[in-house]
Amino acid sequence: MTVLQEARLARAGSTLSTISSVLLRYGLVLVIGWIGLLKFTDYEAHGIEPLVANSPLMSWLYGIFSVPTFATLLGVLEVATAVLLAVKPWWPRVSAVGSVLAIGLFVATISFLFTTPGIGEASAGGFPLLSMTGQFLIKDVVLIGVSAWTLADAMAATLRSQ
């Protein structure tokens, strides 16, 4: 490989890294924010009800809050998390808090894989063949990884800004 080819490859890699970091962070903002806004709708409030109701970690919340109230509170948390993630260029330390919240949100949703009935598709022989609910939840493993990356990115930006 020539020096010129190496320089082009380095530039392309740097550009791809920049574009990828924007897509990771703001893709996560879009996903969490959009899903958070849906929590203000009746259909989404009742859509998450079986997940929460079957969770030993969260079912007790329905003893305190109604289904719509819990969904609204969760929506506020999710939208706030998205906003915190989005402010990284200006306030990386604040954005790190959003990353920690995102990790917590996705750990909670992944826990539903172990507590919600019907995660395996019964007509296909059950687990590990996932139902639509199982497929919806398993993708959060990747979103935890993205959230952890945004945390590392925000921490590095915080150190650079000092």
Image (cartoon, rainbow, N blue to C red):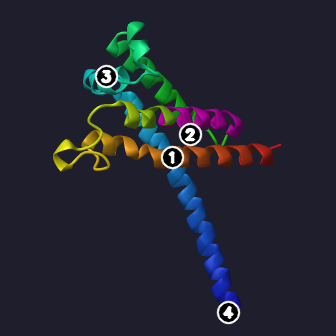
Label 1 sits on a secondary structure element that is: helix
- Residue under label 3, please give it: 49
Q: Residue at x 79, y 45 (%)?
A: 159
Label 3 sits on a secondary structure element that is: helix
Closest to the observer, 26 or 43: 43
In magenta, the rendered stretch is: 91-106
Indicate whether residue 98 is drawn in magenta.
Answer: yes
Q: Amino acid at mark 4?
A: Thr
- 50 left or right, relative to 25: left
Q: Residue at x 67, y 92 (%)?
A: 2
Q: Amino acid at mark 1?
A: Tyr
Precedes in sequence: disc 1 or disc 3: 1
Q: Residue at x 64, y 74 (%)?
A: 11
Label 2 sits on a secondary structure element that is: helix
Gap between marks 4 and 3, in whole Å? 60 Å
Q: Which mark is residue 2?
A: 4
Closest to the observer, 53 or 85: 53
Q: Which mark is residue 50?
A: none
| Marks 1 and 2 in Cβ contact (< 8 Å) | yes
Quarter of the image with the N terminus is bottom right
Gap between marks 4 and 1, in whole Å? 36 Å
| Marks 2 and 3 in Cβ contact (< 8 Å) | no
- 120 left or right, relative to 58: left
Q: Nearer the viewer, mark 1 or mark 3?
A: 3
Count of marks, rendered view = 4
Image coordinates of residue 64 in percent, x first then y, are 42, 7
